[in-house]
Image (tube, grey):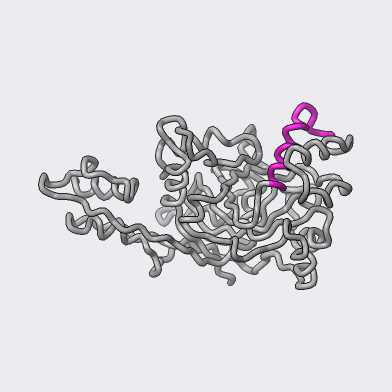
């Protein structure tokens, strides 16, 4: 029982586990591991999801914790790769001529050297929490499945005015927000939140860069838009059961310029669904690569995540000097989000 307790503590805290947390002999000292950076190379999810299956991950590098505690006979379960099974690959593809045109504009261009999906990059680069299409009143999340399956992300709202689009790269975030608000037709349905909406679009277009990280959440068990890969079959009764609440981590691989030919090509490839009434604006392409259970996060991390559920897009964990509620810091929050997530990959059937 004591060893089982110790194993659960180590799984929860990993390298942050202290000797005082465990039932160790008086003369035992825990070794301090050499941390290594992680690099996850997994395919990008695509639509028509059928199931979520565990696979053992032979390339797992989480053996730091295993070797650290091996002397006391505690065996940790190996981290697994989640496998999304789909019928076809619907990842967004761009024709080479359009990619060449975009690369002439450095603000919108895709730069492969900026795309790092590693633990070290996650601990230092900008992270944005995105809550598009979430209806908290009715506990529905219309956009989660489509975003992950089609490798896209957007705060939605409305397309910026066409006359403003060519100036986005040269504007400050505040200048872009004001230019959006100058259009009387923009956000007419937002009423008293129009300024907030324009500010979020401006932040998304200016701050999110190729290589930035995006975090999505799904928390509603009875959401009718829940993708099948967030359900696992109960062997005892044969029913499909929700595995959430979960969060997904992705990295931005492409910023799509509003009103461009490239945007039109992307919008044509986005599957129509109930989550949007027309072409989705303000798009980024994203490789979604890690998934974690929210309930496995430390209590202070869960409290932080719960507090940032509004507005739609938030630049999170960005103040490295601040100590948040319950002693959490930007560094500890980022580490917890990474450590409690696992890689996932797609298999096209």
* Residue 82 percent coordinates (x, y): 48, 61
Residue 309 is left or right of residue 302, and the answer is right
Task: Specify the quadrant that holds the C terminus.
Answer: bottom right
* Residue 200 percent coordinates (x, y): 70, 39
Residue 217 shown in magenta: no
User: Which residue appears at 85% of the width and 46% of the height?
Assistant: 164
Secondary structure, magenta segment, majority class: helix
User: Which residue appears at 40% of the width and 40% of the height?
Assistant: 298
Between 12 and 221, the one lying in front of the other is 12
Q: Is residue 19 above or below residue 66?
A: above
Write down the region rendered in magenta: 188-206
Q: How many marks?
A: 0
User: Which residue appears at 17% of the width and 50% of the height?
Assistant: 29
Q: Is residue 295 visible?
A: no
User: Which residue appears at 48% of the width and 36% of the height?
Assistant: 321
Between 153 and 203, the one lying in front of the other is 203
Residue 31 is left or right of residue 303, and the answer is left
* Residue 7 percent coordinates (x, y): 26, 50
Q: Quadrant of residue 70?
A: bottom left
Residue 308 is left or right of residue 92, and the answer is left
Q: Is residue 217 visible?
A: yes
Q: Is residue 16 above or below residue 120?
A: above
* Residue 295 percent coordinates (x, y): 43, 42
Residue 202 shown in magenta: yes
Between 172 and 191, the one lying in front of the other is 172
């Amino acid at each position: 029982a004591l060893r089982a307790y110790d194993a659960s503590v180590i799984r929860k805290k990993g390298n942050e586990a202290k000797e005082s947390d465990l039932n160790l002999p008086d003369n035992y000292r825990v070794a301090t591991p050499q941390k290594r950076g992680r690099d996850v190379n997994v395919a990008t999810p695509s639509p028509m999801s059928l199931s979520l299956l565990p696979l053992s991950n032979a390339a797992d590098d989480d053996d730091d914790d295993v070797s650290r505690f091996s002397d006391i006979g505690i065996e940790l379960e190996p981290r697994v790769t989640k496998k999304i099974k789909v019928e076809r690959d619907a990842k967004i593809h761009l024709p080479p001529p359009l990619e060449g045109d975009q690369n002439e504009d450095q603000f919108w261009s895709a730069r492969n050297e900026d795309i790092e999906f590693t633990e070290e990059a996650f601990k230092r680069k900008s992270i944005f929490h995105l809550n598009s299409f979430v209806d908290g009143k009715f506990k529905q999340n219309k956009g989660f499945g489509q975003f992950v399956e089609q490798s896209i992300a957007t705060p939605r709202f409305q397309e910026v005015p066409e006359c403003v689009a060519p100036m986005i790269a040269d504007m400050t975030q505040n200048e872009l927000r004001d230019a959006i608000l100058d259009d009387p037709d923009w956000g007419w349905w937002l009423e008293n939140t129009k300024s907030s909406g324009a500010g979020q679009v401006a932040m998304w277009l200016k701050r999110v860069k190729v290589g930035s990280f995006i975090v999505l959440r799904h928390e509603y068990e009875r959401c009718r838009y829940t993708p099948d890969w967030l359900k696992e079959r109960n062997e005892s009764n044969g029913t499909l059961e929700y595995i959430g609440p979960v969060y997904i981590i992705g990295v931005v691989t492409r910023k799509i310029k509003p009103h461009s030919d490239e945007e039109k090509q992307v919008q044509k490839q986005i599957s129509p669904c109930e989550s949007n009434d027309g072409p989705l604006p303000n798009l980024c392409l994203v490789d979604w690569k890690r998934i974690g259970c929210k309930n496995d996060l430390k209590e202070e991390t869960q409290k932080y995540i719960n507090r940032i559920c509004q507005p739609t897009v938030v630049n999170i964990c960005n103040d490295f000097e601040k100590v948040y509620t319950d002693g959490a810091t930007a560094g500890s929050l980022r580490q917890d989000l990474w450590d409690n997530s696992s890689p996932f990959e797609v298999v096209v059937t």
